[in-house]
Amino acid sequence: MLNQEQMKKYMVFSEEVRDALEHNKPVVALESTIISHGMPYPENLETALSCERIVRENGCVPATTAIIGGKIHVGLTEEELKFMATSKDIIKCSRRDYAYVIANGLNGATTVATSILTASLAGIKLLVTGGIGGVHRGAETTFDISRDLQELATHNVTVVCAGAKSILDIGLTLEYLETFGIPVYGYQTDEMPAFYTQNSGFKLDYRMDDVETIAKSINTKRELGLDGGVLVANPIPEDAAMDAAVIGEAIDLAIREAEREGIHGKETTPFLLSSVLNATGGQSLTSNISLVENNAKIGAQIAKYLY
């Protein structure tokens, strides 16, 4: 965490979030790349507002993170959320971009990686997102591995997600997580979810069927001094899940398009998600909204038990 002087210099807390942290109330961090780069307008703003509402309904305070005018914001007003949803002047900000964006007074949407970093700096224990980044297909030659995984390994922040994005190599992502000692707890599932679908075919070591058990394991990890985060894999609701064959074909098509266009680095995921959206006639967006709202609900329920 930053000291008080550094917090005043670099961070802006909403009144709601500041009060919650000062009085040890449960807070749930939310990322902003899903707003600025993950969904079209107005669905992005509607989803952001919906997730914040769900977090409050489940007894926690939402803290959407972003960089606005070079300041790290922890908790956004509705006006700021709309700015993040509509402005074209928003940098997709991972760790390598973080200091530059802040130092130069720019605007940045926090990825999962920088949302984990921001939550850690602010003293927030849990982050909700849609899907975790991971090892991209073909990474054995491209070395394209999301920074999300290293930030998760480094910081004591729990991340609730609908598994790894199905555009990734889920098997290699799980191997990477294991190498860096990141526990993956399946919430009411034996398999790693695949974002748009409930199952990936890759078994998880630990299934937990209630939020209290998950929180107990997280608290015990911290009490033992075992640094690093925890990943909670929460499958997309069954009624919102997509047909595996349909989404698989759309992803394969998107990957081929990315290769033809020479898309790489941090532009890869937004490009692939946009291509999948077009290929599925918008169905993937409906599924995406449903899964992130479900993660907000389960994440808040877990956060109430963390200390």
Image: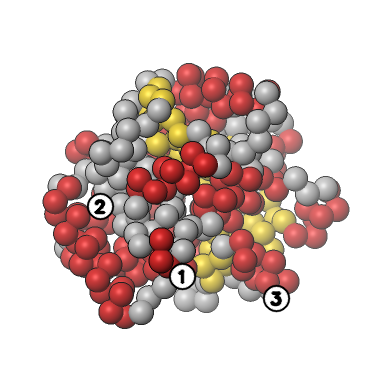
Q: Is residue 38 left or right of residue 29?
A: left
Q: Is residue 37 above or below residue 119?
A: below
Residue 76 in sight in this render: no
Q: Residue furthest right?
A: 5
Q: Distance from label 2 to label 3 (Cα)?
A: 36 Å
176 left or right of 284 in image? right
Which numbered disc covers residue 17? none
Residue picked out by circle 2: 286
Which type of secondary structure does the marked residue at label 2 adopt? helix
> Quadrant of the image for the C terminus?
top right
Q: CA distance from mark 3 to mark 1?
A: 22 Å
Of residues 303 and 79, the one nearer the viewer is 303
Q: Position of residue 122 (x, y in %)?
A: 69, 46
Amino acid at pointer 3: Asn
Q: Residue at x 52, y 53 (%)?
A: 148
Q: State the residue position of label 1.
A: 265
Q: Which residue is mark 3?
A: 104
Q: Gap in Å between the C-alphas at discs 2 and 1?
A: 26 Å
| Identity of the residue furthest to the front in this view | 140
Viewer-proximal residue among 175 and 197: 175
